[in-house]
Image: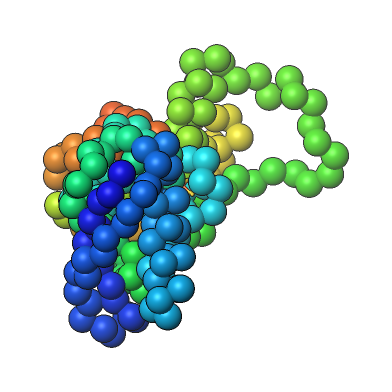
Amino acid sequence: MDIQVRVWRQSGPSDKGRMVTYDVKDISPDASFLEMLDVLNEKLILDGDDPVAFDHDCREGICGMCGMMINGVAHGPERATTTCQLHMRHFKDGDVIDVEPWRAAAFPVIKDLVVNRGAFDRIIQAGGYITAPTGTAPDAHATPVPKPDADAAFEAATCIGCGACVAACPNGSSMLFTAAKVAHLGLLPQGQPERDTRVIDMLEAQDEAGFGGCTNMGECTTVCPKGIPLTLIGRLNNDYRKALRNT
Ligand code: SF4
Ligand code: FES
């Protein structure tokens, strides 16, 4: 496949940035989107140009590092797919593809397609933990967990912290991410001691980080590579109301 990519180039946080057009030739339809960018970068390096900076790590859809706007959609055109798991066969020979970083006030651009997602870390630091005794690992059956609760907690825990939900939200809200993190601990017995303080502190950290408010647009769940459901935001709001009454 021969394609053209229009990539956001920004040398640093204070640079204004601009779209730059590149031809990328002889790409296998079975190459991943990131492998296509690798081919572009090899050419840029050979030409003595600055390669395009982008985040990635596992390239297996599990670490949450990758993520970019592809033709205006977070993680690109395939549902429930991270950028690293998106393959070029979903595009056509001759396509022109726009590639941009996440656009959100709380995720400032560091360089090109790389944004600072430290704001997510601050939300986790505020309440994404439980208190447990140290020592040897407890017996697996020491704390019984009903199967429906275990399944629901597991579903919430599949959030990989990629930030696509924020990038897709017209308000730049991180409610889906925070809701997933609050739910995956709050659904389990081990998460009950901090249940009230967790939801209050994480929402406070979310506001302090500059994320926008949720107005139930639903764009977040549409682009979420793990299919985190909007219902978890309803659960978060209920937890928050209860926590305010209890504290
Ligand atoms: S909720 Fe989905 S889109 Fe948002 S950070 Fe988690 S995995 Fe990514
Ligand atoms: S590189 Fe790890 S999820 Fe994409």
Q: Residue at x 34, y 81 (%)?
A: 12
The image quarter containing residue 43 is bottom left
**Most foreground residue, 30 or 201:** 30
**Most foreground residue, 151 or 8:** 8
> From the viewer's perspective, is residue 83 above or below residue 138?
below
**Most foreground residue, 108 or 37:** 37
Q: How many marks?
A: 0
The image quarter containing residue 50 is bottom left
- In the picture, measured across the screen, residue 183 lies left or right of residue 172, that is right
Q: Which image quarter holds the N terminus?
A: top left
Q: Position of residue 97 (x, y in %)?
A: 21, 52
Residue 30 seen in the figure: yes
Q: Position of residue 74 (x, y in %)?
A: 27, 47
> From the viewer's perspective, is residue 128 above or below residue 192?
below
Q: Residue at x 49, y 36 (%)?
A: 157
- In the picture, measured across the screen, residue 219 lies left or right of residue 1, that is left
- In the picture, measured across the screen, residue 4 lies left or right of residue 192, that is left
Residue furthest to the front: 26
Residue furthest to the right: 136
**Most foreground residue, 102 or 181:** 102
Query: How is the rendered protein coloured?
Result: rainbow
- In the picture, measured across the screen, residue 110 lies left or right of residue 230, that is right
Q: Position of residue 221 (x, y in %)?
A: 27, 36
> From the viewer's perspective, is residue 52 above or below residue 77?
below
Q: Position of residue 101 (x, y in %)?
A: 29, 61
Residue 168 seen in the figure: no
